[in-house]
Amino acid sequence: MRVSVQSDVFDPSQEAADFDANGGGAVVTFNGVVRDDTGTLQAMEIEHYPAMTEAALTEFAVTAKERFDLTNVMVIHRFGTLKPGEVIMMVATAAKHRKQAFQGADFLMDYLKSRAPFWKKEITKNGADWVDAKIADEDALKEW
Amino acid sequence: MQVTVLYFAWVRERVGHGQETIETTAKTISELVNDLRAKGPEYEAAFSDLPALRAAADEVLCDMDASLDGVRTVAFFPPMTGG
């Protein structure tokens, strides 16, 4: 199991190649990328709560591993200033069968969205604004 | 008792700083919020919409009516937007 909270850029292809399935027959990887819906985004600033972030992510990873019988799990999440197109985060899960691997990754994504202490601020040509949490993301947690 | 209070994201911006130490007799997080709101208009602006806020006691998410008994650090922030 690997959990990393970092400002450094990482290579998701390399991380995927290095991810050990530990005998599992299914591996799911997901990366989130900074998107620019309006063509005005200059940067995304990601603030976090250093004393809490890694413990929270580790808790989600341990829960996912037990609940979905994962053979391995990895969570990487960046903070700091990111440009459009840069990778923000990555989740990888390995399990005996694909359903567990997909569900484990989905579970982790839902928890990262709404329970990990990160806050995104969009810096655009027209100013800066905090990204609002979506009700749909909060509702997604109830599915678990 | 003394409590370290941390603010993140727009809560930090409205309050004007990210950390302070408060002397308080508050028994719960929401009582602490009442103490903070009395400190000035910048705090009133940060805490005016309580349902829009989240809190953590000693780095664990908690409800606003959670007890402050034995708690050393309280953090206030908007709903999280990770992922």
Image (cartoon, coloured by chain):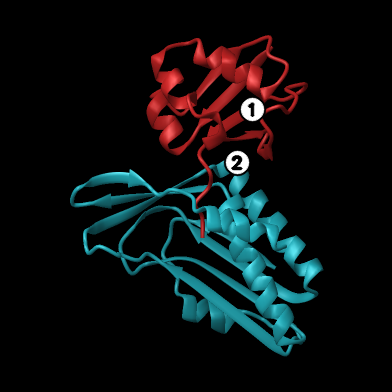
* Residue B48 shown left or right of residue A1 in the figure: left
Quadrant including the N terminus of chain A: bottom right
Point 47% across, 24% down: residue:
B48
Where is B47 relative to A24, above or below? Answer: above
Q: Position of residue A67 (x, y in %)?
A: 80, 68
Q: Quadrant of residue A84?
A: bottom left
Q: Colour of chain B?
A: red
Question: Would residue A111 be visible to someone looking at this image?
Answer: no
- Labels 1, 2: one chain: no
Question: Would residue A29 be visible to someone looking at this image?
Answer: yes
The residue tagged 1 is: B73
Which chain does cyan denote in the image? Answer: A
> On what subunit does the disc labeled 2 rest?
A
Q: Amino acid at mark 1?
A: Thr
Towards the viewer: A136 or A6: A136
Towards the viewer: A57 or A114: A114
The residue tagged 2 is: A51
Q: Quadrant of residue B56?
A: top right
> On what subunit does the disc labeled 1 rest?
B
- Residue with the most extreme bottom position: A25
Towards the viewer: A38 or A87: A38
Tag 2 secondary structure: helix
Q: Amino acid at mark 2?
A: Ala
Tag 1 secondary structure: strand
